Image (cartoon, coloured by chain):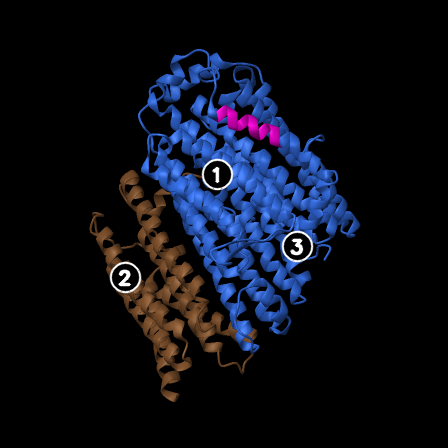
Chain colours: A blue, B brown
Amino acid sequence: MLSLFIGSLGAFCALSFLDIPMLWMIAILGALDLWLVGGYISVAAIMGRHFEFLHGIFVLDPLGGFFLAILSVVAGAVVLYNFGEIRQRGETKLAAHQSSFSLGLTFAFIIAMILSVSGKNLGLIWVCVEGTTLISALSIGILNDKSALEAAWKYVILCTVGLSFSLFGLILIIHGATAAGFEPSLEPDALALMVAKFSPSLLKLAFILILVGYGTKAGFAPVHSWLPDAHSQAPAPTSALLSAVLLNCSLYAIIRTAGIMQAAGLGSFAKICLVWFGLMSITLATFFLLVQSDLKRMLAYSSIEHIGLAALGFGLGTPLSIFAALLHLIGHSAAKALAFLSAGEMVHIFHSHEMIRMVGAIRRMPVTGGGLALAMVVLSGMPPFSIFFSELLLIWAALTAGNIFLASLVLICLATAFSGIVFQGTRVLLGEDIQHHHHDESHDHNGVQDPGWAADDHIEEANVGFSWRRFSMIVLMIVVFIVPIFFFSPFQEAIVRIAEFIPGGLR
Amino acid sequence: MEWHDQLISWLGTFILITGFLTVIFRRFDNILTCYKFQSFALAFMTLIIAHQYGEAHLYGISLATFIVKFLLIPIWVMRVIVKIPGKLEDHASVGAAFSLFSAVALLLLSYIISRDILGINSEKVDDLAISLTLLLLGLYQMMTRRKAIIQMMGILFMENAITLAGITLAKGLPTVIEMGIIFDVLIGILVMITLVFRIQEAFDSIDTQNLKSLKG
């Protein structure tokens, strides 16, 4: 089943690179494949069914199934959005990011991420995560302008260097096995049995190297510097995948490694490292969130904040905090994908990343503006949505763990981030329509380059009727509304079952 | 079995020296030559270790290292270089003497770390120290060099350091993973060369000083 799933995606990938005439069929089939087959596989995996690919090299367990579930939902919507971009190419000169090549890259990126969450062998996870870096670097640089190239170069250099350190850490673990007289292996189950006899200092160094490496990719501060650049410069589908799925994949690799540390009796060391990285990410991201004027950059810093919160939850390592962290990942991925897709649409229509240009957007573009508004409300942590509850549970978990300092620091950061996002969001979306004023400005600055922007007086939701891009946003909006049901049984029990596979969980 | 160990330690020293030379050299073709020699020594060392321990899969890895890192990558990179106009001399932000001094400091640091971690009596202290030094030298090169293509060489040197650690400390990773890593290196070079080309087109230079517009 898993082989069929990955194989069909591979076929779609190849067909889109070939640019066959019936691209719409590829896109729709790909999205359906991701939603239905991917959804079925991940639910079955969470329920305990065993899937394997390539003679058991790749296996999917409930933890992998959880990450695959998030991936499938988001990736399906992204594929449709990407196809919507290609659809528009008839009118304008064909840009690289609007060609079928970009759809092929998106499929390849999705496949690499599916492989990395269905790897159990630590070495294999590394190979796949490095693969995602290389593929996504191409799709970040696809816009081919100067800043996109800069972002792509920084991304590929920083992440490859970080992952080199991770690989070095893995080699140290293998050395630990040989030095202790065992058959070397990177299978977590085999390692868990023998890791207690390894030298603790060697394991600690290995874990720090691995954590820093994958942490670079997950966007932990202070090694996050590629993230805002890449997220803001990439085309919208890539930004959405990077933020909503790729960061989770690196977190998955970190969780797997932390499991080894737990088995070696060094679980508390691993947890402290994770808590520190999480705390640093939250504080730093909150600070930078407040001063952004670029919409996509602000969303990127919000990603750092939320990934930091999830790391904090896994780091606290109580059943409650892990439950909260898992739910936080679901809520963040759904809302962030929606945010980046609608932000991409806004950038496309307003020809600018600057939020000041988009004032009053919701009146002119009900769907896109509404999507962005909903995403921002969710991301800021407003009550009826899931992120509010998971943040509440996280703080509660920190308090019950007796860590009042941690809880209050996180609370301050969350409140600050909340006010930052709400302030920017209300200004951009609901603010007074002062379009004419900005028109004059745009004439001064780049009226010549952007005749389209300067010419029409009323910017409105691009040509009425059915649009794949808007359709994908509406799907994600529905998903965002659905997410809070995971707090109720029987869904709650499913999450608890996944939490058992995480070190410090119920097991 | 004495000659195995002796030859391995000679090769290790040779690899370390090529690593030192890379931080001193300014011109790109010299650095690439260093890389070729280092990769050759690495492939040879893998062969000897394969013979010493009778590990069949290491023969394959030795061959793959030789083909990919000694033949394929240098030829590939050379073909790109001829298309980039201008002399590929790097104005590093630090001088050669300072670089050499830093390299020695990194070597000492690596020895201290590996002795602390493995214990003073472990026979693997040298191996870990050399690979850790090479890893840090690769990082040092990426931080001090400005030309994009030389930063890319830094990544290749780091990857060599990891391969060295893999064969000396762990007697090779599992074959599937080793092949995966080599595959990743190949794709990585392809992607980075593509980016270098595009940077050259967009900025008319491959100086990474130009890549500083995104901040905050």
Q: Chain of mark 3?
A: A
Q: CA distance from mark 2 to mark 3?
A: 45 Å
Q: Position of residue B86 (x, y in %)?
A: 21, 49
Q: Position of residue A165 (x, y in %)?
A: 48, 60
Q: CA distance from mark 1 to mark 2?
A: 33 Å
Is disc 2 surrounded by few (<14), some (14 to 19) or many (20+) residues within 10 Å?
some
Q: Chain of mark 1?
A: A
Of marks 3 and 1, the one in the foreground = 3
What residue is shown with label 1? A231
Is disc 3 surrounded by few (<14), some (14 to 19) or many (20+) residues within 10 Å?
many
A226 or A471: which is nearer to us? A471
Do callouts 1 and 2 mark residues in contact (Cβ within 8 Å)? no
Which residue occupies 41% across, 51% down? A157
Do callouts 3 and 1 mark residues in contact (Cβ within 8 Å)? no
Q: Position of residue A228 (x, y in %)?
A: 50, 40
The region drawn magenta spans A469-479
Residue A8 visible, this angle: yes
Instruction: Please tell me in which quadrant of the rendered image residue A148 appears.
Output: top left
Quadrant of the image containing the C terminus of chain A: bottom right
What residue is shown with label 3? A502
Which residue occupies 39% across, 25% down? A87
Label for residue B117?
none
Looking at the rendered structure, the secondary structure element under dot 3 is loop
Is disc 1 surrounded by few (<14), some (14 to 19) or many (20+) residues within 10 Å?
many
> Which residue type does callout 1 highlight?
His
> Which residue type does callout 3 highlight?
Ile
Sequence-wise, the earlier of marks 3 and 1 is: 1
Question: Is A265 within the magenta?
Answer: no
